[in-house]
Image (spheres, rainbow, N blue to C red):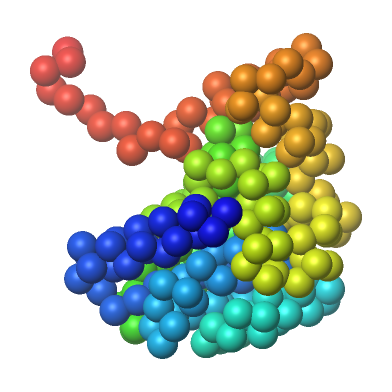
């Protein structure tokens, strides 16, 4: 794990050098992956790294864990509360849709959750422009393969330092880096709505996805879920589809 961490830190420094920017920043949610990335970018740029907490009607425990992650690595930090911004914006969207008779109640929860993710990413890029930093993503290999991220939300970043590491490997990395145990051992959740957990929403576990990605045998039911998620979210892993005149 020491070798992996050293290689990632060197890669992060190279990305900053190649881009001609000043440093790195990450949104800190209080979860495992963002805590690990906060530690990594702090190692790469002790004076030019930033962790940003963005509460948005969030579980207070997640914000406590986010602060503990920040404190454990000593990274510079900001907190921007987006609760009112989201409430005003989404209320206006829903009001306009309802006025046209086009509001779909069954899509409400997911649409609101995705807007939260995109507001957070917009906030990160506004701050990044101020500091001339790159925005660092937190997706691991399980999330990337299954598309368990919001397009142009937490998936809209400049670089992805842990995308080739399974959830289990990221957990090992967290322990090596000194991420607090309560963060390492908590149930993964994107905090999209009350009671939401990643594994409940996906219908399978990270351990099972990790095993599948390593080529191990997994139950047929889980294999079907994983492959269906991968196929359905292929568009998230590709550049924007463009029309080419020579195609027609």
Q: Position of residue 108 (x, y in %)?
A: 72, 48
Q: Position of residue 52 (x, y in %)?
A: 56, 78
Residue at left offset 70%, top offset 45%: 168
Q: Can you name the residue that lies furthest to the right here?
A: 195
Residue at left offset 83%, top offset 54%: 187
In the picture, residue 68 is in which quadrant? bottom right
Is 13 placed above or below 188 here?
Answer: below
Q: How many marks?
A: 0
Is 146 placed above or below 178 here?
Answer: above
| Left or right: 80, with 13 as reference point | right
In the picture, residue 242 is in which quadrant? top left
Q: Position of residue 151 (x, y in %)?
A: 50, 46
Residue at left offset 82%, top offset 58%: 185
| Left or right: 31, with 89 as reference point | right
Q: Nearer the viewer, residue 52 or 39?
A: 39
Q: Quadrant of the N terminus?
A: bottom right
Residue 29 at least partly seen: no
Q: Position of residue 24 (x, y in %)?
A: 40, 72
Q: Quadrant of the C terminus?
A: top left
Is 175 placed above or below 196 here?
Answer: below
In the picture, residue 181 is in which quadrant? bottom right
Residue at left offset 35%, top offset 76%: 23
């Amino acid at each position: 794990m020491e070798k992996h961490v050293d290689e990632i830190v060197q890669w992060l420094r190279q990305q900053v050098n190649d881009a001609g920017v000043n440093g790195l920043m990450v949104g800190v949610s209080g979860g495992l992956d963002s805590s690990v990335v906060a530690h990594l970018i702090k190692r790469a740029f002790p004076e030019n790294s930033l962790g940003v907490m963005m509460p948005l009607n969030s579980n207070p425990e997640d914000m406590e864990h986010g602060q503990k992650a920040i404190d454990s690595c000593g990274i510079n930090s900001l907190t921007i509360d987006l609760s009112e911004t989201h409430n005003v914006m989404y209320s206006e969207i829903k009001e306009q849709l309802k006025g046209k008779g086009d509001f779909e109640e069954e899509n409400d929860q997911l649409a609101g959750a995705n807007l939260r993710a995109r507001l957070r990413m917009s906030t990160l890029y506004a701050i990044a422009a101020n500091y001339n930093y790159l925005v660092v993503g937190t997706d691991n290999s399980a999330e990337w393969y299954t598309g368990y991220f919001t397009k142009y939300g937490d998936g809209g970043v400049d670089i992805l330092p842990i995308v080739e590491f399974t959830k289990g490997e990221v957990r090992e990395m967290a322990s090596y880096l000194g991420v607090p145990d309560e963060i390492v051992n908590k149930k993964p959740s994107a905090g999209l709505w009350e009671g939401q957990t990643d594994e409940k929403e996906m219908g399978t576990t990270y351990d099972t996805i990790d095993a599948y990605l390593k080529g191990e045998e997994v139950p047929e039911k889980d294999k079907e879920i994983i492959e269906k998620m991968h196929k359905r979210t292929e568009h998230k892993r590709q550049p924007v589809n463009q029309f080419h005149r020579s195609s027609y």
